[in-house]
Image: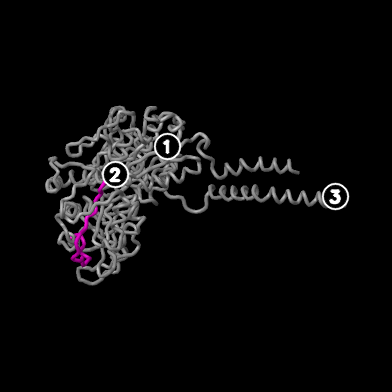
Amino acid sequence: MPRRLAALVALLAPLAVVSLGAAPASAQSYVPVSGSGSTWSQNALDQWRRNVNQFGMRINYAGTGSSDGRNQFRNGTVDFAVSEIPYGLRDGNAVDTPPQRGYAYMPIVAGGTAFMYNLKIGGQRVTNLRLSGDTIAAIFTAQITSWDDPRIKADNPGLALPARRIVPVVRSDGSGTTAQFTTWLATVYGGQWDEYCKRAGRTANPCGTTSQYPVVAGSGFTAQSGSLGVSGYVAQGQNEGAITYVEYSYALNTGFPVAKMLNSAGFYVEPRASNVAVGLLGARIDNDPSSPTYLTQDLRGVYANADARAYPLSSYSYMVVPTRLESAFNEEKGRTLGAFAYYFLCEGQQQADALGYSPLPINLVQAGLDVVTKIPGVQGQEVDIRKCNNPTFSASGENVLAKNAPQPPACDKRGPDQCGTGTGGAKTSTPVTTQRGAPDAAAASGGGAGSGAAPADTATVAAGGDPVALDPSALAADPSLADPSLDGALDPAVAASGTTVSAVPVSLAARDGWSTQSTLVLVALALLAALVVGPPLAWRRLQAREAQGGQQ
């Protein structure tokens, strides 16, 4: 009987492991790896790190800011870094020198830099604030200092805004989020930004992009370290009137609203996954493999994207990975880092939307999979992009996420009406008034007649996407410009030429209902229960029989 039980255990154990899903490689083959950098991306990265613990991977990460992460990678004190900006940034008179060690950029996730705020009217939290780019720039250059400023009122005709001081909260550390935000300021509001920098004591002219936000003395600004620092400050009850720039994920986690931002089409939108995906149709990616900035982004087309659904401050984040065995990086670490990268480029992207990010488009996943092979020691995998399980794209490469992104409601169009629905992590609506001065229940709920929500089949962005950079407005006007035969992939001829290409987000519809995987999980749990409970019960029954036979 003991031999039979042992045989049963040997038979059932592999079945249970297969049903639950085996690790991508033997746990004994993994060694810990360490990284540091971006807090903009940290919420996604931390979730992925927890997910791969089951496979024996130990990915240590410290969110110390993009600038520190790049410095640590350059100095060889970490195995990888995460940043929203590449090396080579000229910040004032200083240049962020690229490292001597071999490295490459790998896109990891997309998202929107949001404006999280803490504001009340008559003791009730405001959850539906709207801000134009002009107003945002004026707030963060100390030109608008009170919430009842006429320019903010013009953005919010349905709100009786209070005469409360605005407290802009900026980053005190070197930050990729700051660099992204100031790149937008320098690009769209250059003169205004230069004047502010001059008042803050910066001598560089033009002021340009900076990862260290300049603060004018006596301006009422406050500075906090990290994304948790700025979002945590805004979320404190005593800090009513505060507003900060931070990745959308942090507003979701704290339960606070974000401002809907006015886009070039004249609609106020928030950085949900689909709005970010549409916005990034205007991104131009460096597609020259010989370039030191290969796969990094030019966002000028995102800022000016004329699609009504586009969020203007959408961007990508990158992992800086080693490409040579140096600075204490060995093949064992490369095996672990490579397996982690394979995971988050495909499976990990499934959680991006729920975490407050937007999954990568198909062309950047393909490019990222190529970058993985450059990590020394990686166990290369033949990944079928059609079975990647990245929720952004279907097996055919159809651009579902951008194609099915809903049109904004009519009350989000710039004008006398205003939606009342909450944004970000705020679940409650805010009552608004119509031109007649009476509360508008339909606007407050975000629904009702005339909401302006368009059906999915009216989307103006073509599915599939054309690998050649196109003006977003031209693509919207003529979807036939996209070549569906390419399935969203990069044209090899374009790739070889080094031509800048468009980032093309696509999506796979979410799975609903019972699935084969659900059945397998139940079967696995039953098998595991049998393995744990069955042998002891059988052994006790065998001993009882032997005892009974002895008494006879």
Query: Which callout, 3 or 2, points to the residue nearer the camera?
Result: 3
What residue is rendered at 31% in x and 33% in y?
A: 74
Please, is residue 318 above or below residue 459 in the view?
A: above
Magenta span = 154-173
Callout 3 secondary element: helix
The reply, left or right, for residue 88 in relation to residue 101 is left
Dot 1 corresponds to which residue?
33
Upstream in the sequence, badge 1 or badge 2? 1
Upstream in the sequence, badge 3 or badge 2? 2
Please, is residue 188 above or below residue 145 in the view?
A: above
Callout 2 secondary element: strand
Q: 408 or 287: nearer the eye?
A: 287
66 part of magenta stretch: no
Q: Residue furthest bottom?
A: 438
Q: 193 or 400: nearer the eye?
A: 193
| Main SS category, magenta section | loop
Point out which mark residue 246 bears.
Answer: none
- Binning the other alpha carbons within 10 Å of mark 3 as few (below 14), some (14 to 19) or many (20 upward) gives few
Q: 528 or 413: nearer the eye?
A: 528
Residue type at mark 3 is Gly
Query: Which callout, 1 or 2, points to the residue nearer the camera?
Result: 1
Residue type at mark 2 is Ser
Dot 3 corresponds to which residue?
550
Residue type at mark 1 is Val
Dot 2 corresponds to which residue?
315
